Amino acid sequence: MAQDDTTLPPTPADTAGTTVPGEGRPRRTVLVAMSALLLGLLIAALDQTIVSTALPTIVSDLGGMQHLSWVVTAYLLASTAATPLWGKLGDQYGRKKLFQTAIVIFLVGSALCGLSQNMGELIGFRALQGLGGGGLIVLSMAIVGDIVPPRDRGRYQGLFGAVFGASSVLGPLLGGLFVDNLSWRWVFYINLPIGLVALAVIAAVLRIPVHRNRHTIDYAGTAVIAGVATCLVLVASLGGTTWAWGSWQIIGLAALGVVLLAVFIAIERTAAEPVLPLGLFRIRSFWLCSVIGFVVGFAMFGGMTYLPTFLQVVHGVTPTLSGVHMLPMVVGMLIASTGSGQLVSRTGHYKIFPVLGTAVIICGLLLLHTLTEFSSTLTMSLVFFVFGFGLGLVLQVLVLIVQNSVGYEDLGVATSGVTFFRSIGASFGVAIFGTIFANRLAGELKTALAGMALPPGFDPAVLRSDPHTIATLPASARAAVLHAYSVSITAVFLYAVPVAAVAFVLAWLLKEQPLRGSVTAPDASETLATNPVERTSREEVARALTCLGTREGRRDLYLRITERAGLDLHPASSWLLLRINRYGSTSPQLLTDRTDVPADVIAHAAEELEVRRLTDREGTVLLLSDAGRRTAERLVEARASVLADMLGDWWDPSREDADLGRLLKQLSAHLCGDDRDRPARPESLTRTSPATP
């Protein structure tokens, strides 16, 4: 498979006479471009959750309670299906143009959603919006690799993770605020000014070196797997509501889904670059994590979609307050997700988290089932927190387990594959929860209203399409209808328990293996995003190893390098010696101004190198002595060896000329620092030519 060489900027030695991506740009330009990328990511991430608190009002305005789930499902399915296409098309035609195209598609879809006059239009336009949203998420993250060097990438990836975390919290709140103070249509209109700003900034300041990488794009496989998912979700959402389970329409959709699945398998067997390689399913950890991820998506989005309806209709809270009530669930999810990922990275043990997480999810579902119209705010908050905490225990760890169990060649596609199944699970969860709710509500309302005195001319069917009409009922009838809504919504959580129990059993079958040194807790983009973030194996390795670019990571890395080289230098001295070896000379004063290493650390390192006669000083410039040159060569060899060790069995020395070998060389070079502090000096001061690590 062709790889995109923009993932890591080439080293200066590789690009004599050219501008190094991310290095030749002014810092302000990078920050402005990054802000535009974050804005694009924000609107795409918000639209995964912002609709949830607006759904009851949307249904009251447009009707179609039985189709409520498709407002969420259409977006999820479209963004999931489009993700691999956006990633590969960006490789072939340039990510800037594709990102601008994704913004335009997303904004057009948002405007049309806000103008929708019926539920059918809204569902169709949500699919269009999801098509653009998938591109915004995957391309914004890929562009970071084009404009930011590896040593700085960790801090920017943290910003992207923060956007996903913030959108999970802000989505329900903003949705409620817009409904209460403006209109549900502003849930979609708000994207327009934000997106236009992002579009203008990207056009003005973003400059990406275009590296054409030809792909044999699996258009057929992508279209067919999207068709399979759509058929099965249609069966789940329309069966028993719009059409009877035994109707020819439902049977036909199910049969079509099975046929398309067989076609998909046949296509993937021969595809040059399959969207989902079938060989992955021979890896035990992959298919187990895929099923568990499916269940997590099923429960998470089923809950996030119908809990606001429970709060607004049954408890009569405003849309804004329903968003506030949802915060304990999101907070529990974020705490557990972050904490479990960090604990796994530090301890090397991961099996306990999916086992414990699925058990807590089951407890959360059972507790959600016990909620009634009389439950207190404190009780609901605690239940929501437990449910979110269980989800969070599993989110981070599934990606980490899969990355630890596959070979380098499958790393990227396996990472996106496990998220793909969670996204499909989310689509099924919303659809199936909607079917159970609609069927249960019809029966409960019929029982509740039997023998009740209703206002003249009142049509009981209106209660299913417009929950706001409950307020027009007499007190006794209103209480009965609220109970019917309460029972119908909480029933869906009980039906989800057997599904979660399957995940709990499968979690026990996971086999714990020693963690590779390069496998670290994935960022929030891989755990909170609902659609798979398409990345190559090369990008995944770079993402894992760029944590070494942080100050703490560098110190630990150079401590290991120094020990491997058999030297008794301080880590900072080894770092400084390698910089001088790379550039020929360096100035401690300039390093103090242009790096994030403290001045006293640089001063002590420079002093140690001079005392040990590893460097000579000419004015303010340090140059290598003969002894220093020999010591630096030992450090260069040790550094490559340490990085290779971190890759574990992903690394094969025979692949020196392969893509992974080039990646290691680039990372090894860039972990020295950056070109900004390379001193301008006459050639007469250069005792040795710059060495290439």
Image: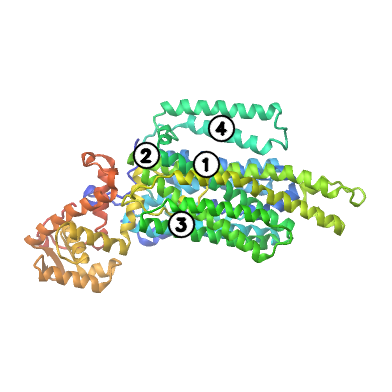
User: What is the distance, in whole Å, between disc 3 and disc 2 at their CAs?
Assistant: 24 Å
Local secondary structure at mark 3: helix
Image position of 198 with respect to 417: above or below: below
Color theme of the render:
rainbow
Q: Check if mark 3's residue and mark 4's residue have beta carbons within 8 Å.
A: no
In the picture of the structure, the residue carrying the numbered disc 3 is 161
Q: Earlier in the sequence, mark 3 or mark 2?
A: 3
User: What is the distance, in whole Å, between disc 1 and disc 2 at their CAs?
Assistant: 19 Å
For this view, does 530 lie left or right of residue 475?
left
In the picture of the structure, the residue carrying the numbered disc 2 is 410
| Residue 448 shows up from this direction | yes
User: What is the distance, in whole Å, between disc 4 and disc 2 at their CAs?
Assistant: 23 Å
Local secondary structure at mark 4: helix
Residue sitting at 58 percent across and 48 percent down? 299
Residue 186: image x %, image y %?
A: 65, 55
Given the current orientation, which residue lies at the most extreme left position? 626
Considering the image in quadrants, where does the N terminus appear?
Answer: top left
Residue 32: image x %, image y %?
A: 43, 59
User: What is the distance, in whole Å, between disc 3 and disc 4 at their CAs?
Assistant: 31 Å
Query: Which of the 4 image quadrants contains residue 160?
Result: bottom left
Q: Check if mark 1's residue and mark 2's residue have beta carbons within 8 Å.
A: no
Q: Amino acid at mark 3?
A: Gly
Given the current orientation, which residue lies at the most extreme bottom position? 600
Image position of 361 with respect to 438: above or below: below
In the picture of the structure, the residue carrying the numbered disc 4 is 228
Q: Earlier in the sequence, mark 1 or mark 4?
A: 1
Q: Amino acid at mark 4?
A: Val
Q: Amino acid at mark 1?
A: Thr
Q: Which mark is residue 110?
A: none
Local secondary structure at mark 1: helix
In the picture of the structure, the residue carrying the numbered disc 1 is 80
User: What is the distance, in whole Å, between disc 1 and disc 4 at their CAs?
Assistant: 13 Å
